[in-house]
Image (tube, helix red, strand yellow):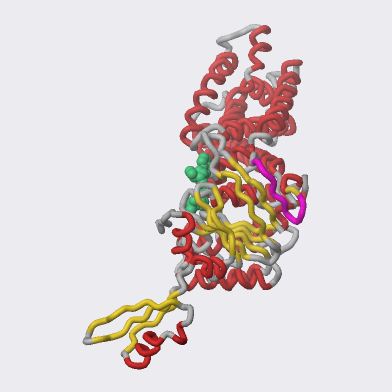
């Protein structure tokens, strides 16, 4: 791993996300959330902001990386990357980090939109621990980006990927949402449901928010989820994203 | 410099091999042409030689070392131009080039290269707005960015107008003069006929002949002279054997007495030879 080259690749990824209009989409999304928030009542911050950040870290991560891989595919640029001294690991890592940085920015834009829409009062109370929220977003985004990468290896095109993604996310999100709104209750379910990575992400992001008493409330479920996302991401990265990359790239360069 | 021995390759999804035991050697400082019809296996061979396709059988060595033993630093040494455009379309030509340039240790003089292929004036244009020929020319610049010792060019003249094709050929020659080695594929024989030091004919994954174009012409060319002259308002055509042409009375007599229209030696084109050797007609699709 050559860190100078990795840095060049990450900067390249980010500048491409910008050139290909993905950044503009993030800004638009944040803006839309701002408008939505402005229109609804102001008592929902506790549930609504974590939920939006959760969508951003999961669904949007997969979508952004899927879109990026799609652009590369249509332009055969992966072929030319294969004949540079860049290693596959550097290429994959730069995509993961590039997408994570982008998604962090987009999440922070959403937080800013909440603020501007008057839902957050930064001066008096933040409502959450910025450090923990950032930690949660970064870890979740990285893991879901790796998941998105692996998914795009197995899909012919972007629409194909979108369809699979929606099916997977929809199925995984239902129990998460049911729990969130208290339809499913109980200690057992709340812990058991953490095998669902979406649930784990929600847990990790909500963990960064203060409870009614204005304190952080981190129980074993929080740490379990954090560990799960971290280990899951690492396993996916080393045992899937990297080893399957060459195959994928070669298929892209095919006739 | 490059040695390929009994190379065989099967694409994972295909039932049978597309490369069927080919062997050849490329000497340092040589322009080696790889000629064959569409689907013969030219691009596949190139992709194996540049370590993109991995599960091949046989051995390939570069500078005496098995290419499988090289790491990613192999790519500091070689330059590759693919059949299709390989650039980010929503970035300018220069943004593309600068991005790739930074990934290498050695950096070529980009302005000089871009001027040479006539793209310097268009350097700030989005590659997406480039014509096909411009994209191909940018591919060439891309291939030369790292001052490679060896170039791999897959159908580089395909889609270039005659002027640009000529510029490209001059660049390839200069590259060789400077000590570089070139592997170049084409399905249009005439395109690289005079360029190559040696050519290999490949058909259905097999090499049918490897030699210099000159030797091939001597070996397979017809040694005759064809004369066309006017007689009673009509063109008459006659063929004479090349051997002893200076003593051939009929031939000399015609030269002296007739109004000569054309006089050709029986130079066979590489394309004719290809057809003769392989029995396969080349189709020029583009
Ligand atoms: N990715 C692939 N998967 C399966 N088969 C392939 C793949 N790429 C090429 N082939 C097959 O391998 C054979 C050789 O293809 P190749 O692209 O090497 O030919 P080529 O000589 O470069 O032809 P052209 O002049 O059209 O570029 C063809 O029969 C082709 O169908
Ligand atoms: Mg080809």
Q: Quadrant of the C terminus of chain B?
A: bottom left
Does the segment drawn in magenta span residue B105? no
Does the segment drawn in magenta span residue B64? yes
Residue A61 left/right relative to A122: left
- How far across and how far down the image is residue B143, in percent? 62, 60
Q: Quadrant of the N terminus of chain B?
A: bottom right
Quadrant hosting residue A1: top right
- How far across and how far down the image is residue A161, in percent? 51, 32
- How far across and how far down the image is residue A9, in percent? 68, 49
The answer, for residue A28, to whether it is visible in the render is no
Q: Which of the pair B65/A167 is nearer the observer?
A: B65
Q: Which of the pair B227/B114 is nearer the observer?
A: B227
Q: Is residue A103 above or below residue B116?
A: above
The answer, for residue B172, to whether it is visible in the render is yes
Q: Is residue B257 above or below residue A17?
A: below
Which residue is at a point 72% across and 48% down the rendered structure image? B67
Magenta-drawn segment: B57-65
Which residue is at a point 68% across and 47% down the rendered structure image? A10
Q: Is residue B271 above or below residue A234?
A: below
The overriding secondary structure of the stretch rendered in magenta is strand
Q: Is residue A166 above or below residue B178?
A: above
Residue B258 left/right relative to B155: left
Residue B28 left/right relative to B141: right
């Amino acid at each position: 791993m050559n860190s100078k080259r990795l840095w060049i690749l990450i900067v390249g990824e980010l500048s491409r996300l910008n050139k290909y209009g993905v950044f503009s989409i993030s800004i638009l999304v944040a803006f839309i959330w701002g408008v939505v928030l402005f229109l609804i009542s102001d008592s929902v911050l506790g549930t609504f902001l974590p939920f939006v950040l959760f969508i951003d870290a999961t669904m949007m991560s997969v979508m952004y990386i899927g879109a990026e891989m799609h652009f590369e595919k249509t332009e055969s640029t992966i072929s030319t990357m294969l004949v540079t001294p860049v290693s596959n690991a550097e290429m994959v890592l730069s995509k993961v980090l590039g997408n994570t940085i982008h998604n962090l920015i987009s999440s922070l834009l959403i937080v800013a939109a909440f603020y501007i829409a008057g839902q957050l009062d930064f001066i008096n109370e933040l409502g959450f621990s910025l450090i923990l929220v950032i930690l949660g977003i970064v870890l979740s985004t990285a893991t879901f980006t790796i998941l998105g990468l692996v998914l795009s290896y197995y899909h012919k095109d972007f629409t194909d990927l979108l369809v699979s993604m929606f099916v997977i996310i929809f199925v995984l999100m239902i129990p998460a949402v049911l729990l969130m709104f208290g339809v499913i209750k109980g200690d057992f379910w709340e812990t058991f449901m953490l095998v669902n990575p979406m649930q784990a992400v929600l847990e990790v992001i909500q963990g960064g928010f203060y409870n009614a008493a204005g304190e952080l409330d981190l129980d074993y479920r929080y740490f379990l989820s954090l560990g799960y996302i971290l280990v899951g991401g690492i396993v996916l990265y080393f045992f899937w994203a990297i080893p399957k990359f060459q195959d994928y790239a070669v298929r892209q360069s095919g006739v | 410099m490059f040695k390929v021995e009994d190379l065989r390759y099967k694409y994972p999804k295909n039932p049978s091999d597309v490369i069927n035991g080919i062997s050849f050697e490329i000497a340092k400082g040589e322009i080696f042409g790889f000629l064959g019809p569409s689907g013969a296996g030219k691009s596949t061979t190139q992709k194996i030689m540049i370590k993109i396709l991995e599960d091949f059988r046989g051995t390939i060595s570069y500078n005496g070392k098995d290419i499988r033993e090289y790491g990613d630093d192999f790519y500091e040494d070689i330059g590759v131009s693919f059949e299709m455009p390989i650039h980010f379309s929503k970035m300018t030509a220069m943004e593309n080039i600068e991005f790739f340039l930074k990934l290498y240790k050695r950096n070529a003089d980009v302005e000089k290269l871009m001027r040479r292929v006539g793209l310097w004036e268009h350097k700030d244009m989005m590659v997406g707005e480039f014509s096909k020929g411009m994209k191909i020319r940018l591919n060439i610049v891309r291939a030369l960015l790292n001052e490679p010792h060896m170039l791999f060019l897959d159908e580089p003249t395909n889609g270039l107008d005659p002027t640009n094709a000529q510029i490209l050929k001059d660049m390839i020659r200069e590259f060789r003069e400077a000590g570089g080695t070139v592997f170049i594929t084409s399905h249009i024989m005439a395109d690289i006929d005079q360029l190559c030091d040696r050519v290999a004919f490949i058909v259905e994954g097999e090499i049918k002949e490897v030699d210099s174009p000159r030797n091939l012409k001597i070996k397979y060319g017809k040694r005759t002279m064809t004369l066309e002259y006017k007689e009673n308002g009509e063109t008459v055509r006659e063929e004479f054997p090349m051997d002893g042409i200076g003593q051939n009375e009929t031939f000399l007599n015609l030269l002296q007495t007739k109004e000569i229209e054309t006089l050709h030696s029986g130079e066979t084109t590489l394309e004719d030879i290809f057809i003769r050797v392989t029995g396969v007609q080349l189709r020029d699709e583009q």
